[in-house]
């Protein structure tokens, strides 16, 4: 096994890889709580049950999709990079596709499945590089930052820190509310952990906030710590396949196409950015290229397809893997460790089930902070670039839609570049995306 994972070549050992894998798991374990809460729209009251996914089934799907993604990444691509259902993509799934578009969650899962299958095709054919290279870096960074703002906005809403205000659309909520106080406490604790460089700070912040919430009666006490009778996956397992066989005609429309393309686009660049960032940190890049990139992307896409069939939103590579690398991880064995820990976590469902939106809100806010750091890579002195980048970023939280932000930015980019006399710098694919997103707004109107 040491030879297969190239321990000697990478200067690592079992102890370093185990600690690295454990650190990565602790840094991203919050997704086991946040993802089910997000996809079941727990923060949105008075919704019919038909619009809500089953919490237990989503929890299982989250854990299994993460485990499969980590194991494939570790064994096939041999990178210390962990995967799980992605933040931002789950928000798009729940708040845009289901809540705003009114698309049933069953059909939304089919959209995730299609995006994963297309991703596999693009990876195997080599078209991935062509599409990625056609989109300017500034827009890639703006998309990441915009998703960060959107996630933060959702976290503040979930905690009742930001609420509806008839006069100003939004405003500051009642901070004496128990949910808001618990979220603020959790945020302070998490910020302290993160500022001190404590690995798994987000996870520990959730843990401490949950315990404090239980002590003061804001959060229910769990019925048990471990339960070998895990939740059933029957409510979501295989549901993504049903529209394909039973009502394929319902999938043939521009709205569904935009949903699939958005899942595909965000996963594309989230994965590419994470792979490059973590590989650079671990010193695994060679001649500015990523070895086994195709296998890493294949692991990501297979995990997405598996997750869709299980019943969760898009599975993607996690930047939290950098925490494991910082702790010593260098090989795929660390990802295997993380994957096994996700499998074990299934039996701790009773503890995770009682976690509320107020407890997880700090995690959403902090992840938003980390994602917004991409803004520093945009050249704001170039007005023709600054405008589409800014509109991409700001339209996501204000329009309450990741797709809307991407669409607006990709429409304005060719316009501003052409007016600035830089039309030759625009890749032909960008013109194609311009047309697609113009049609997207026409369809919405």
Image: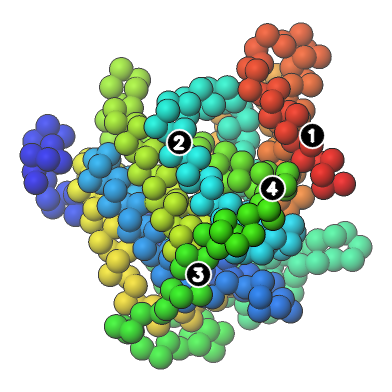
The residue singled out by tag 4 in the image is 252
Residue 121, numbered label: 2
In the rendered image, residue 209, in percent from the top left (x then y), is placed at 48, 74
For the residue labelled by badge 3, is the local secondary structure a helix, a strand or a loop? loop
**Going from the N terminus, do you reach mark 2 or mark 4 first?**
2
Cα gap from disc 2 to disc 4, whole angstroms: 20 Å
Do residues under tags 2 and 3 come within 8 Å of each other at their CB atoms? Answer: no
In the rendered image, residue 133, in percent from the top left (x then y), is placed at 53, 22
The residue lying furthest to the right in this view is 167
The residue singled out by tag 1 in the image is 438
- Dot in front, 1 or 4: 4
Cα gap from disc 1 to disc 2, whole angstroms: 26 Å
Cα gap from disc 4 to disc 3, whole angstroms: 23 Å
The residue singled out by tag 3 in the image is 236
Q: Foreground: 60 or 249?
A: 249
For the residue labelled by badge 1, is the local secondary structure a helix, a strand or a loop? helix
Q: Residue at x 22, y 46 (%)?
A: 75
- Residue 30, image quadrant: bottom left
- Dot in front, 1 or 3: 3
Do residues under tags 2 and 4 come within 8 Å of each other at their CB atoms? Answer: no
Q: Residue at x 42, y 87 (%)?
A: 222
Cα gap from disc 1 to disc 3, whole angstroms: 34 Å
- Dot in front, 2 or 4: 4
**Going from the N terminus, do you reach mark 1 or mark 2 first?**
2
Q: Residue at x 70, y 19 (%)?
A: 382
**Going from the N terminus, do you reach mark 1 or mark 3 first?**
3
Residue 362 as seen in the image, left or right of residue 30: right
């Amino acid at each position: 096994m040491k030879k297969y994972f190239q321990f000697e070549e990478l200067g690592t050992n079992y102890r370093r890889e185990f600690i690295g894998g454990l650190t990565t798991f602790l840094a991203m374990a919050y997704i086991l709580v946040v993802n089910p809460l997000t996809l079941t729209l727990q923060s949105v009251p008075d919704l019919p049950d038909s619009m809500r996914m089953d919490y237990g089934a989503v929890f299982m799907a989250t854990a299994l999709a993460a485990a499969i993604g980590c194991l494939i990444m570790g064994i096939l691509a041999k990178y210390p990079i962990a995967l799980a259902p992605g933040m931002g993509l789950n928000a798009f799934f729940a708040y845009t596709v289901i809540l705003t578009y009114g698309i049933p969650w069953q059909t939304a899962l089919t959209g995730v499945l299609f995006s994963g299958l297309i991703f596999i095709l693009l990876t195997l054919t080599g078209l991935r590089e062509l599409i990625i290279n056609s989109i300017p870096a500034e827009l890639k960074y703006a998309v990441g930052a915009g998703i960060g703002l959107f996630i933060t906005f959702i976290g503040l809403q979930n905690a009742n820190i930001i609420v509806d205000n008839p006069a100003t659309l939004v405003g500051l909520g009642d901070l004496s509310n128990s949910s808001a106080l618990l979220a603020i406490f959790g945020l302070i604790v998490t910020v302290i952990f993160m500022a001190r460089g404590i690995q798994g700070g987000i996870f520990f912040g959730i843990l401490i906030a949950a315990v404090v919430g239980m002590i003061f009666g804001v959060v229910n006490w769990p019925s048990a710590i471990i339960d070998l009778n895990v939740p059933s996956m029957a409510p979501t397992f295989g549901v993504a396949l049903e529209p394909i066989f039973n009502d394929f005609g319902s999938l043939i429309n521009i709205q569904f196409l935009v949903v699939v393309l958005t899942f595909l686009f965000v996963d594309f660049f989230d994965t590419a950015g994470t792979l490059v960032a973590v590989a650079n940190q671990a010193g695994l890049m060679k001649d500015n290229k990523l070895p086994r990139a195709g296998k890493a992307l294949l692991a990501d896409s297979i995990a997405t397809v598996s997750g869709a069939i299980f019943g969760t939103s898009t599975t993607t590579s996690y930047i939290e893997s950098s925490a494991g690398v910082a702790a010593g991880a260098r090989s795929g064995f660390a990802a295997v460790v993380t994957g096994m820990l996700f499998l074990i976590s299934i039996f701790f469902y009773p503890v995770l089930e009682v976690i509320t939106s107020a407890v997880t809100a700090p995690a959403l806010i902090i992840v938003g902070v980390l994602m917004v750091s991409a803004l520093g890579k945009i050249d704001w002195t170039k007005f023709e670039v600054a405008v589409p980048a800014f509109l991409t970023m700001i339209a996501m939280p204000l329009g309450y839609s990741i797709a809307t932000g991407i669409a607006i930015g990709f429409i304005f980019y060719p316009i501003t570049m052409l007016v600035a006399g830089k039309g030759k710098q625009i890749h032909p694919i960008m013109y194609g995306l311009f047309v697609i997103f113009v049609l997207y707004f026409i369809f919405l109107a």
